[in-house]
Image (spheres, rainbow, N blue to C red):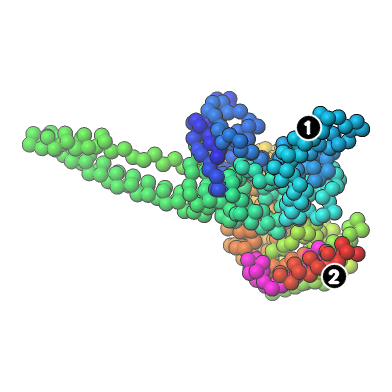
Amino acid sequence: MISANNVTLRLGKKALFEDVNIKFTEGNCYGLIGANGAGKSTFLKILSGELDSTSGEIIITPGQRLSFLKQDHFQYDEYPVMDTVIMGNARLYEIMKEKDAIYAKEEFTDADGIRASELEAEFADMDGWEAESDASTLLNGLGIETDFHYAIMKDLTGAQKVKILLAQALFGNPDILLLDEPTNHLDLDAIAWLEEFLINFDNTVIVVSHDRYFLNKVCTHIADIDYGKIQLYAGNYDFWYESSQLMIRQMKEANKKKEEKIKELQEFISRFSANASKSKQATSRKKALEKIQLDEIRPSSRKYPYIDFRPNREIGNEVLTVEGISKTIDGVKVLDNVSFILGHDDKVAFVGSNEFAKTTLFKILSGEMEPDEGNYKWGVTTSQSYFPKDNSKEFDNDDIIVDWLTQYSEIKDVTYVRGFLGRMLFAGEDGVKKVRILSGGEKVRCMLSKLMISGANVLILDEPTDHLDMESITALNNGMIKFPGVLLFSSRDHQIVQTTANRIIELLPNGTIIDKITTYDEYLESDEMARKRTVYTSNKFAEEDN
């Protein structure tokens, strides 16, 4: 168990948290939610001991081990992957290293023998002989192939490092597990594996995530941070949302009844306070009026942007024809003879662990890259707008936001352009910020403003939820559902894929595709998906045997 007792954190004159009291108990998974800047990650750092609170204390049950997902992807660059994972249990790793040092000595003394015996006993008690096997299971589950388990961390990609640090946090069955955005940069298969891991995890989990589907799957409770306080709700994210909205409605209804009673009492007092025969009743009603207190209903600190993609023209029947597209990059065949046709009602989610293939295909279809073989043709009634995964080139200039967006607008009127920025929460002076200094989330909201102002009837979106808070993700989800044009998109957000897509195209590791008209959940449960897993598992073992 871990608890916060009267925890306050002040940053200058501002109190980020004030007298927070909350208890996290064994066997539960707590989703820590709140608006950007509410202090979710900060509170996790206080719980982990990385950050001291101004006052109050964090209490952990004696003897329990806490594990915290590390965010520094370069911290372990000089270590092997296997060592990095096992470091998740610091004491076990210390024992392993001390044992190795003793056994490596040229002269082995009696004292060394006694110490080695002590270490071996502790090592066995901690299931040390299973450490590498357990670490491999975690790595395989997260999609790190066996070939990489003994590689050096610096030789791996950023996405692989993210998964390895997550495996480190999960390693060794910690009593308290703190996870800050664990689904970031994970593909949907790895997220599904993590969901099952946490559902079956018996100890305490506290997780920050912007993935609503993930929170719904794994959470038994929601801890909502708003205005420096943390309110605990039993249930998952959807249950929190319904409960919090119901509570506000009930408070508003109660206040309405109180206001009606206040008005009634005030009218009586006004009419009869000067009437001698009614003065006693008027005095009684004055006392009753003084006792009525309206509930304080503070508006949430959450702010929702308004995302509405409106095409300038209706799309025709011929949208996109892709014929035999192939692409090899750095000697690896990323796309192999990819062909498909899109119709005017298609909203297609491109899924699978091969993220580079998805990005490559989107770059080709948006004209940023040429295929090695094959071709594609857009319908004459189509207009496309592209949201790239890497938007850094867009903001490598000294434009202010309003000028940056104006260049993409047919209507050059500043008021018109500012209207689109206002929908994305850029109000007043925000419009004169230089785009170069914007945060990751602000840049994504700028890109979404660009898509809205374009009036395109085909949108190509490559991981548009990266860097967005939950409110913006919800608004984007709603905007994608309402969009009357054609969508081609990839997203790690399960809920966006499930609620938006009516067609799934999976890019397989060998560069080919599976194309199905179905929802995402139906696709995951399909025989086709099961056959694909069987085929690729068989092929993998065949390759290893060879």
Residue shown at 85%/47% (left/top)?
151
The mark lying in front, picked from 2 and 1, is 1
In the image, residue 428 lies in the stretch drawn in magenta: no
SS of the residue under disc 1: helix
SS of the residue under disc 2: strand
Residue shown at 54%/29% (left/top)?
57
Where in the figure is residue 81, as x and y percent of width and height? 81, 45
Where in the figure is residue 311, as x and y percent of width and height? 64, 62
Question: For residue 115, which numbered disc appears in the image?
Answer: 1
Q: Quadrant of the C terminus?
A: bottom right
Where in the figure is residue 278, as x and y percent of width and height? 10, 37
Farthest left residue?
277
In the image, residue 511 lies in the stretch drawn in magenta: yes
From the viewer's perspective, tell me whether residue 123 is left or right of residue 269: right
Q: What residue span does the magenta drawing correspond to? A: 508-528
Question: For residue 337, which numbered disc appears in the image?
Answer: 2
Please rate how many residues cluster around mark 1, counting C-alpha atoms within 10 Å: few if below 14, some from 14 to 19, many from 20: some
Q: Quadrant of residue 442?
A: top right
